[in-house]
Amino acid sequence: MRFLSIIHKIAVFGVVGAVIPLAGCGSPDFTQMKPTVWKPTAKVFLVGSPPGWQASKALSLATDNGVAAQVVQVPLGSFASDLKSAMAQQNSGLVLAVVNGPVPQSALSVMQGDPKTNFDVVSFANSIGATTNAANNVKWILPDTLLTSYALGWLAGQFAVQQPLYPVGWLSSGPSAMSKSEMQAALAGIYAGSTGGTPGNSGLTANSTNSVNSSGGSTGIPGFSGTPGTPFLGAPLSIVPVDLSTTPLPPIPKVMVVTRPLTSSEASLLKANGTEIVSLVAQPGGVAAAAQPQLPGPAAVADEFKKWSAHQWSATPSISSSVPFVQVDKPVVPVLTQQALANLQTSIASHRAYAAGAWSQLPPSLQQLWGPLS
């Protein structure tokens, strides 16, 4: 038995001795070890078929800025449930949601309930209301409503001079979704679109140059030459407030500027009248507007991917002036007018102060006449 005990001790010692040399090879050389590199990822939701956005474009935008992304296209009605499901499966760190329509409160609740995930939400200001500061993990990317208002007003003025027997209607029933300055920008745009420019070409910045349209008049808009062949009135047309809630209905002009989302019955009424709707706000699905604001495009979020990749993301809202910021119903708007509108957007995006100050340059008599509309 003693012999077996000695053998056992030798065996144990041999095993320990075999282990000790392996453990004594020295401490790990951390200088030779490669640290784990953070690979930023994102999930992109294209909600409700937003104009100007395609899955391939969103994917390449993320890739070009160092972010590995997954892109999914979902209808607006299932956005909240699809978002919740995606969050339960995997935390992407960053979620970009491009929402073509009102952002559902249920989707906002999902975002607020996942504070470890950052959300970039591309939407319209009138679609989100007071929710812009609802959570510090949600960033809103919105179009510049002052620029869109001026451009849409200009288009309404263009429609009016192409139908000179009709004034421009201005929806006066129901609470407006626009601020006073945005509505004033639209009114100044109507003036510019119908007359070919601002009074005396004043109100330009020191670096601006006046451009001459094909009718020989100065548009007064920096870098913009107007629509070829447009028969400008040379004087402001009339803008008529229209209350769609009254009975009997007042005469409805063939061009109507609206400052809030329309109900389906209001939209049907205007359509039956043959009225072209120029909406200063995004309209709900099913409302056919000749023109309305467009969501910021991919160029507006390129920096967001860069910031995320560089650990510089913040929830500070972003106001985008990327063009185009107006979408049109192409069969309704003449091709030359579409081209001129595209040029106008490029011009005022580079000269925002012009659009912001256009109202103050209208004659005092017009400001007094049109002021109550805003």
Image: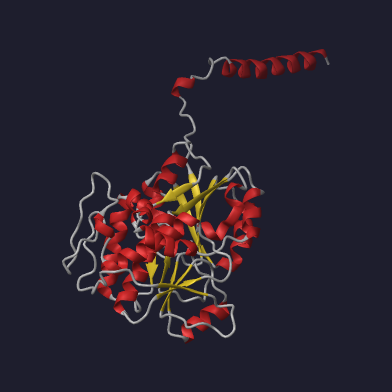
Q: In this view, does 88 lie to the left or right of 145?
A: right
Q: Nearer the viewer, residue 207 or 116?
A: 207
Give coordinates of residue 285: x percent, y percent. Answer: 52, 72
Residue found farthest to the right:
1
Q: In this view, does 93 lie to the left or right of 232?
A: right
* Residue at (19, 64) in percent of width and height: 217
* The quadrant where residue 246 appears: bottom right
* Residue at (62, 51) in percent of width and height: 111
**One can see residue 295 in this view:** no
Residue 66 against residue 369 in the figure, above or below: above
Q: Which of 205 and 47 is in front in this view?
A: 205
Residue 219 against residue 338 in the figure, above or below: above
Give coordinates of residue 116: x percent, y percent. Answer: 61, 42
Give coordinates of residue 311: x percent, y percent. Answer: 48, 36
**One can see residue 359 in this view:** yes
Query: What colouring style does the render use?
Result: secondary structure
* Residue at (51, 42) in percent of width and height: 316
Residue found farthest to the front:
365
Give coordinates of residue 374: x percent, y percent. Answer: 48, 61
* Residue at (60, 66) in percent of width and height: 78
Q: In this view, does 347 lie to the left or right of 39?
A: left
